[in-house]
Image: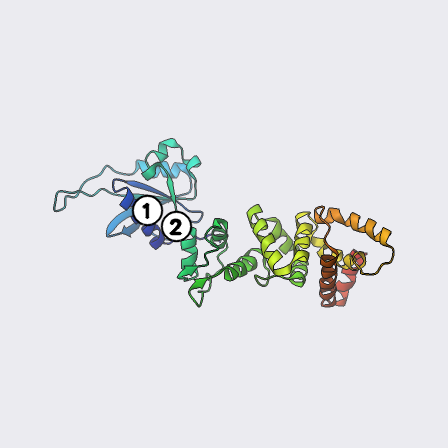
Amino acid sequence: MTTGPTPAQVAAQVAMIRHQRPEARVIGVHTPGGWLGGATLQVNGESCNVVYCSSGLQVREALVSLQAPHPHFLPGGEGTEPLLVVITSLDEAQLGLDVLARLAGRQLYRIDHWHMVRDLFHAHEVDPRLPSQAWLAEALLQHVPQGGYPPVASGFLDAETVWKHLLTQCLDLPNGCPDAVTLLTWSLSASNLHRYEALSEEFRTALRQRVQDTAGAVGIAMLDALDAGHGVLLLPIGLVCDILFSPSGQRQIEIAQARARLEPYLAGRLPSSEAGRAWAAAAAAVLASLPDSQRHDWLARAE
């Protein structure tokens, strides 16, 4: 599910904008999720009206319904004007220039997604390597598990914890440190392969670096097969690698020709002999763990 900002997060954002633009009567806030609060919001003692809009028409209706100010005079002669906070998943291009002209700063303000993630994990600090990767925060917000994320015991949200939850929630991998055996076992499920196909390009790029760190060159070769649309063949390819990358010096010409025919299955990139042998070893381990009936099926596919 996709989570939206909490009232406290919106209140903090509105307080900052009010400090910069005290004359603002309408503040627009963009969020990919919904609104977790009510129709009013307290910001530094000021009561603001809040409306969540999922369409440009709803935003226009909210602006039309905004009544002319009726100042309440305070000691010193100052008056207060009603403030409307419009929360929406739309972006500026979907609102139109006439709507933007009514908003503070002529823009939609973005909630700090890493601040939201920090709150979800009850963390006091975030690994300094993470905030520069905005997509990571968005992915965590879009895949909050039922019941929420468990609080980090130390109060520090590190990269390992982030990858653990991302890979388990988005790909159904058992942990955030997949090795070759884990990737092969995971690939045996068609639903897992569909999960990979749904990943954004940004996610796939970052995943390659993660798999490089946890599984090495053989993991990257497996991702090449996934990107080429051959994820269902990860195990059979590994079994074939036992022949193609055998250290034996037999039939080198035939082996070289066979390796060339393997390249299209791996997006045109042939793995090194070391990576090929690692793939073969992982495939043998996975095959041995399967029931006899499944083992025969996979051997047939390898043939």
Residue extending farthest to the right is: 251
Residue 135 at x, y percent in the picture: 50, 49
Q: Please give the residue where the numbered disc 1 appears in the rendered image.
A: 50
Locate the C terminus and report the quarter of the image it occupies.
bottom right
* Residue closer to the observer: 195 or 266: 266
Residue 253 at x, y percent in the picture: 86, 51
The crowding category of the residue bearing disc 2, from other C-alpha atoms within 10 Å (few below 14, some 14 to 19, many at least 20), is: many
Q: Earlier in the sequence, mark 1 or mark 2?
A: 2
The crowding category of the residue bearing disc 1, from other C-alpha atoms within 10 Å (few below 14, some 14 to 19, many at least 20), is: many
Do the numbered discs 1 and 2 sit on residues whose CB atoms are within 8 Å? yes
Q: Please give the residue where the numbered disc 2 appears in the rendered image.
A: 35
Residue 12 at x, y percent in the picture: 32, 51
Q: Quadrant of residue 24?
A: top left
* x 62%, y 49%: residue: 197
Q: Secondary structure at mark 2?
A: loop
Residue 196 numbered tag: none
* Residue closer to the observer: 285 or 196: 285
* Residue closer to the observer: 121 or 253: 253
> In the rendered image of this protein, does residue 70 appear above or below residue 122?
above
> In the rendered image of this protein, does residue 77 appear above or below residue 184?
above
The three-letter code of the residue at mark 1 reads: Val
* x 34%, y 55%: residue: 8
Q: Secondary structure at mark 1?
A: strand
